[in-house]
Amino acid sequence: MIDFLVIGGGIAGISAAARLSKHGSVTVLEAEDALGYHASGRSAAMFEENYGPPSVVALNKAGARYLFSENGGYLSRRGLMLLASRDQADQFDDDVKDLNMQGITVVEARACVPIIDRGSVAFAAVGEAAFDIDTDRLLQDFARVIRAGGGSVLTGRKVTGIRKNEHWTVEADGTFEARIIVNAAGAWVDEVAALAGIAGIGITPCRRSMARLPAPGGHDVTTWPMLLGAGDSWYAKPDAGKLLVSPSEADPVTPHDAYSDDMVLAEGLARYEAMVTEPVIRVETSWAGLRSFVSDGTLVLGPDPADASFVWSAGQGGYGFQTAPAASQLVADLVVGAQPDLDPKDIAALRPDRLRR
């Protein structure tokens, strides 16, 4: 009998399993052949403490120390630069306030990122508190915690059946019995819930596409900040000497192994291209990931109100990695009855109970 059976081997499931491994036996079931295959493996990998709705920001702040210092730290400074055209003035002001950024001149912006087009960009701002996350190391370190505690992380185990009598019985290329299930199946959480006879939370997977471009104009992009279009209309991020550009779309789709939409990607690249002096000559590769949301746009963490032995770690949207240290700790605290460190109003905004009213 397993104490905690976690369904899903992305950052949500692996981090929750690592926290719970201190309180009992843990097994993680991942349908794919590798951990972090879907949303976790296609993340922009950024930490910006003020990014997200209030309950997400609370998680960001609560987990910041872990990301900065645990195991030598997982963050490296990147910085963020916001760009806007003249007709985006109001949106620019809102974004600057929300992200706690500092306005700079376009000349100053171009001194940092020389491809900025002074004819198109009318407003610019910077935020220094934006960091790259070493996502693979964070995921693998949580997995090591599970294994060090005697737990199992099993890949290639798609859940095909769940039933409950005195305890949960889960079929996934084998039979597993557990006291508690943690549903961390990403875009598939409502499908897992349906197998268990639990009401869904109304999860909506949303596609986000990405293109990898050669360094524009042959520039060294290593020290460039992440570039963000006003209103989250596009972003560009240096990565291994290349530039990742996304149209920042959030188009609802069914759960699947996501791939980029060529038309949406072209439109996003055009929005980026309009703000810079270097044309997009070649796309080296493109892909997409699914960012899954519930109706209020924040995470769903903790026991289901109808059955406390069915626990949610879901709805991470685009915040999964930056919230993982605090979100996983909250899940564990709520499961074992420990007192969470978060403010009660933030906990209430994250619990599944809010969706059942």
Image: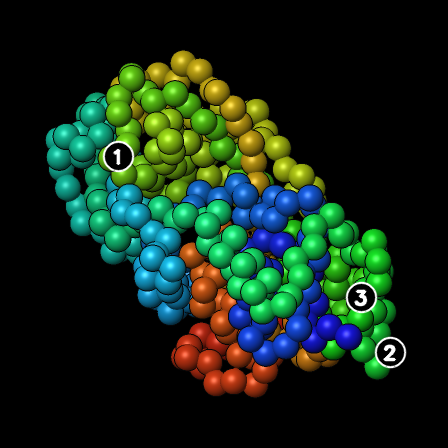
Question: In the image, residue 352 lies at what x, y percent?
Answer: 61, 72
Determine crowd level at label 1: few under 14, some 14-19, many 20+ residues with C-alpha closer than 10 A: some
Residue 172 shows in this picture:
yes
- The residues bearing labels 1 and 2 have C-alpha atoms spaced at a distance of 56 Å
Question: In the image, residue 110 lies at what x, y percent?
Answer: 18, 29
Q: How many marks?
A: 3
- The residues bearing labels 3 and 1 have C-alpha atoms spaced at a distance of 48 Å
Residue highlighted by disc 1: 224
Disc 1 element: loop
Residue highlighted by disc 2: 165
For the point 32% across and 20% down, which residue is it?
Answer: 216
For the point 56% across and 58% down, which residue is it?
Answer: 143
For the point 48% across and 76% down, which residue is it?
Answer: 347
- Residue 289 versus residue 188 in the image, above or below: above
Q: Amino acid at mark 3?
A: Phe
Determine crowd level at label 3: few under 14, some 14-19, many 20+ residues with C-alpha closer than 10 A: some
Q: On the image, which quarter does residue 50 sit in? A: bottom left
**Of the pair 197 and 150, the residue shown nearer to us:** 150
